[in-house]
Image (cartoon, rainbow, N blue to C red):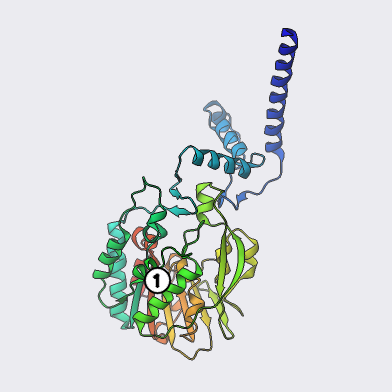
Amino acid sequence: MKKNKLTFNKIFFASFIFLWLATAAYNLVKPTSDFSENENRYLAKFPRYTTEDLLEGRFMLGVEDYINDRFVARDFWISMQSVLEYAMGKRESNGVYICSDALIGSIDEPNREYVAGNIKAINNFTKVTGLPAEIMIVPSAAEVQAYKLPRFASPWNQSAEIELIYSNIDDAVCVPVGEALKEHKYEYIYYRTDHHWTSWGAYIAYKAYCETAGITPVEYKANRVSDDFKGTLYSTSGVRFIKSDYIEAYVYSGPVRCDISNGVTARSYDSMYFSEFLDKKDKYAYFLGQNQPAITVYGNSGGGKLLIFKDSYAHCMAPMLLENFSQVTLVDLRYVNRTFDHYFDISEYDRVLFLYSIDSFVNHSDITRLNLIGTAN
């Protein structure tokens, strides 16, 4: 009996070693993409061999990273790990709070130098151009839907920060978007797996903007275009058990043209929506495509022309604004590397909107590029 048990143990051990070696060998030779859509990052490549790297251990560490990144059924094992960790009480992963029905991103505290610089640039821009202006700083789900957060979470006060920013804005009229969103905090206004607001959240903000700017908002109608959106927080956290999001698109009533410019050339499209992205991981790019320096959409509302300096929060709100403006130009200063005249003519516009998420405004300095106004190449 003892002999049989010993034989079984040897066979089991040998089988385990064989399976492990076979899996490792397969990982080394199996064809894989260098980019993981689920994790939204490039995977480790097989390291270049040098004797020095081998002797100092860097080569084997590189091989380990390569195998880990391309392990068979990697996403399945990541999913299983997240389930087990959640069962053990873990409620945060890679800067993402794991809530019962949603993932909510944690945002770094404000960089005072960036905040001051961004405010100064906006004040300078409105003073130089004289355009009627509004500013909308959008709080994140961590602020508006704080009731979802784990008990240990202690995010900083975004509402107080937005109030401080608004108090230092000279000429632009401040849109109380945070208050409007909080009135709907129990509704589907932020995606469960992504850091953006939903189309419904954007519509609430659109109405708040119209009220601030003295514009009559139109009624909202939407079509559901996807039921399987897994966003940036899904990729960052490694958590796979939160329900996928659905995406709705505003239905604009008239014909439209969309021009996308990189500052050198422009391409025209007959739609604001890019349906090819609905079959990819980055489904939010359905709205106006991926980030570009300048995007101009034209409608037939007969209204004036609106210039928006923005981050990607503006993308699903832009179609709504075409009901009030005949032309809307969206400028993403992160990608602007030339003077403004390469992208648009400021003299053509009737008013301007600064639309940014709180994270973009307090932790990035690209808004200071507004100081390019009036400068030469």
Tell me, yes or no, if residue 374 can be seen here: no
Asked if residue 226 lies left or right of residue 147, the reply is: right
Q: Residue 283 falls in which quadrant of the image?
A: bottom right
Crowd class of label 1 (few under 14; some 14 to 19; many from 20; radius 10 Å): many
Please provide percent x and percent y for residue 182.
37, 66
Q: Residue 126 falls in which quadrant of the image?
A: bottom left
Q: Amino acid at mark 1?
A: Leu
Q: Residue 289 falls in which quadrant of the image?
A: bottom right
Q: Residue at x 42, y 79 (%)?
A: 307
Query: In the displayed image of the protein, which residue is found farthest to the bottom?
Result: 302
Residue under pointer 1:
355
Q: Is residue 295 above or below residue 146?
A: below
Q: Residue at x 34, y 77 (%)?
A: 134
Q: Looking at the picture, tell me which residue is in the foreground, 173 or 345.
A: 173
Please provide percent x and percent y for residue 203.
46, 74
Which quarter of the rendering shows the N terminus? top right
Please provide percent x and percent y for residue 236.
50, 50
Tell me, yes or no, if residue 372 can be seen here: yes
Which quarter of the rendering shows the C terminus? bottom left
Please provide percent x and percent y for residue 304.
43, 88
Query: In the displayed image of the protein, which residue is found farthest to the front?
Result: 186
